Image (cartoon, rainbow, N blue to C red):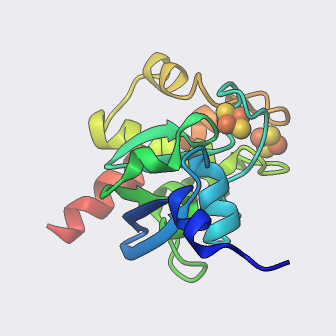
Amino acid sequence: MAVDMQELVEDSVLLQCRVNETPCEEFIHPTTSLLDFLRENLLLTGTHMGCMTGHCGACTVMVDGSIVKSCITLAASVQRKKISTIEGLGEKESLHPVQAAFCEESGFQCAYCAPGMLLSTVELLNETPDPSDAEIRSALSGNLCRCTGYQSIVRAVRTAAKLYTADKETQE
Ligand code: FES
Ligand code: FES
């Protein structure tokens, strides 16, 4: 079936943003969620699809440094903003300190919640470098984990706080 290009452009929004530091320009439907844009247009499938109602946190990404649930965020609303997904956090060979801490403390089992837990932890530590357990639990309250029972996650965030601070100090 022939595609009517005029109709396609009229039903579309030109989204320009940066994703993990890479400039990105794509025509999208105005109702496309940020989650679908990342997973389907950009093939960044590290951001997980869970409840699709804003409750589980599996789809968490950062927009200009603040976490959002991408399943309930319109892609069109991130026009000219900076998006960070789990793919941009660290490399296999050189893990981000928060990733290293979760590995060290067994903060995951199936890891379905991991992208959201990690990005929520990064936001927490950027704002509160030495959080109390209550602050950790509050910061992660929008991220559900069905496997770990949360004790190891809280421990991982405590370790992450030490590693992240040390990492920042060596970069200064
Ligand atoms: S998939 Fe977005 S909060 Fe669950
Ligand atoms: S490790 Fe399985 S959902 Fe968190």
Q: Is residue 11 above or below residue 149?
A: below
Quadrant of the rendered image holding ligand 1 = top right
Quarter of the picture containing the N terminus is: bottom right
**Which picture quadrant has residue 130?**
top left
Q: Position of residue 137 (x, y in %)?
A: 54, 22
At x 59% / y 25%, what residue is drawn? 142
Q: Is residue 85 above or below residue 51?
A: below
Q: Is residue 75 left or right of residue 146?
A: left
Q: Is residue 12 above or below residue 109?
A: below
- The residue furthest bottom is 93
Q: Position of residue 7 (x, y in %)?
A: 60, 63
Q: Is residue 159 left or right of residue 163?
A: right
At x 64% / y 68%, what residue is drawn? 41
At x 85% / y 50%, what residue is drawn? 110
| Viewer-side residue, 23 vs 119 | 23
Q: Is residue 145 left or right of residue 31?
A: right
| Viewer-side residue, 95 vs 15 | 15
